[in-house]
């Protein structure tokens, strides 16, 4: 199965490709019409971890346990 990339992933790859071609952060931001801070963030992240994916987010913990959710699902049937 072919995995297609999202627009976010393509944009991040373009940032790194342009950076590797010795473009400045200002030039990359202008070419891609994005903020310099976004360019800086992804270049820094790539240098630190060599990754361009989003990190997992914590989010709010659920008020119901998995067992309680299953009980509700059964009750609704």
Image (cartoon, rainbow, N blue to C red):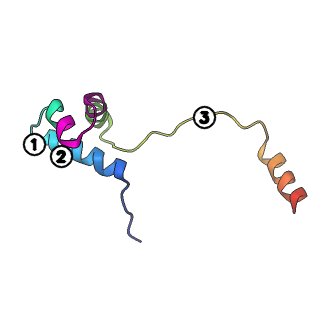
Q: Quadrant of the C terminus?
A: bottom right
Q: Are marks 1 and 2 in contact (CB under 8 Å)?
A: yes
> Can you tell which mark lies on residue 59?
3
Q: Position of residue 71 (x, y in %)?
A: 87, 52
Q: Are marks 3 and 2 in contact (CB under 8 Å)?
A: no
Marks 3 and 2, how far apart at CA: 32 Å
> Can you tell which mark lies on residue 17?
2
Q: Position of residue 56 (x, y in %)?
A: 50, 40
Q: Secondary structure at mark 3?
A: loop
Q: Position of residue 30 (x, y in %)?
A: 18, 36
Marks 1 and 2, how far apart at CA: 6 Å
Depth order, front residue of 9/29: 29
> Can you tell which mark lies on residue 21?
1
Q: Secondary structure at mark 1?
A: loop
Q: Secondary structure at mark 2?
A: helix
| Up-down relation of residue 74 to residue 22 (above or below) | below
Q: Quadrant of residue 61?
A: top right
Q: Earlier in the sequence, mark 1 or mark 3?
A: 1
How many residues crowd mark 2 within 10 Å: few (<14), some (14–19), many (20+)? few
Read off the magenta span. 28-40
Q: Is residue 75 magenta?
A: no
Single out the residue that lies furthest toward the bottom: 1
Q: Position of residue 27 (x, y in %)?
A: 14, 35
Magenta-highlighted stretch: main secondary structure?
Answer: helix
Q: Quadrant of the N terminus?
A: bottom left
Number of on-image labels: 3
Q: Residue at x 79, y 40 (%)?
A: 64
Whether residue 76 sits left or right of residue 8 in the image: it is: right
Marks 1 and 3, how far apart at CA: 37 Å
Whether residue 44 sits left or right of residue 20 in the image: it is: right
């Amino acid at each position: 199965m072919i995995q297609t990339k999202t627009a976010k992933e393509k944009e991040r790859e373009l940032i790194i490709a342009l950076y590797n071609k010795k473009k400045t952060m200002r030039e990359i931001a202008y070419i891609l019409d994005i903020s310099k801070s976004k360019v800086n963030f992804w270049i820094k992240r790539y240098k630190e971890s060599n990754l361009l994916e989003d990190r997992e987010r914590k989010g709010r913990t659920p008020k119901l346990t998995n067992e309680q959710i299953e009980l509700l699902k059964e009750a609704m049937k």
